[in-house]
Amino acid sequence: MKPLKAIAGILLALFLMAGTVSSANAAALLADLENALMCKCDDKCGKVLINCTCSTSDKTRGEFTKMLDSGLTVDQIIAMQVDKYGETVLSAPTKNGFNLTAWVTPFVALLAGGFGLSKIIEAWKRRGGSLDDESATEDSGTQISSKYSNRIQEELDKIES
């Protein structure tokens, strides 16, 4: 009789754990869905659904939960929302067609900016003179340093008086 109770206890524990895992899985699926879609509330807040707190977002979450419970996948629900509202409902642009430029442009801009910055730095180095001519560099550095030192001293004298 004791082994039967032990087996029943183990089966009950497994059943309860399976329910917890499925609810955690459902919450993760809902979070994925909320991250993928924008809120379509009346005041046009422009927030990703997971970050929106309006009443429309609460209703939408309830609808999505029902859809997930009925067996629809996240991709199917996203496709239904795109069919209903268009691609503007997506929180990130698709990675095909013209939308691909939204993914590529920031990287191209970074590369172009880095290249341009390196050219500017090279031009500044060339304009600054060579390192072999140390006396000219020291003289100009001393002149600049004394110029600013004199200016600072004049400003301090004005403040003190």
Image (cartoon, rainbow, N blue to C red):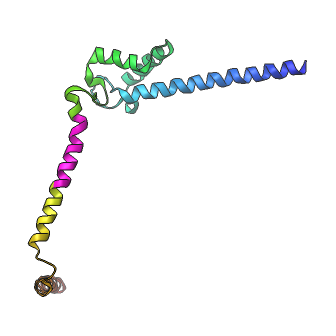
* Residue 119 picture location, percent across and down: 14, 60
Is residue 126 left or right of 102 when viewed as pictured?
left
Q: Nearer the viewer, residue 68 or 119?
A: 119
* Residue 86 picture location, percent across and down: 26, 19
Q: Provide the residue span drawn in magenta.
A: 102-115
Occupied quadrant, residue 143: bottom left
Does 108 appear above or below 41?
below
Is residue 143 left or right of 24 when viewed as pictured?
left
Q: Quadrant of the C terminus?
A: bottom left
Occupied quadrant, residue 125: bottom left
* Residue 139 picture location, percent across and down: 11, 87
Q: Residue furthest top?
A: 70
Q: Residue furthest right?
A: 1
Identified at 12% across, 68% down, the residue is 124
Tell me how many marks there are: 0
* Residue 40 picture location, percent across and down: 31, 23
Residue 109 in the magenta stretch? The answer is yes
Does 146 appear above or below 79?
below
Residue 144 in the magenta stretch? The answer is no
Q: Quadrant of the N terminus?
A: top right
Occupied quadrant, residue 24: top right
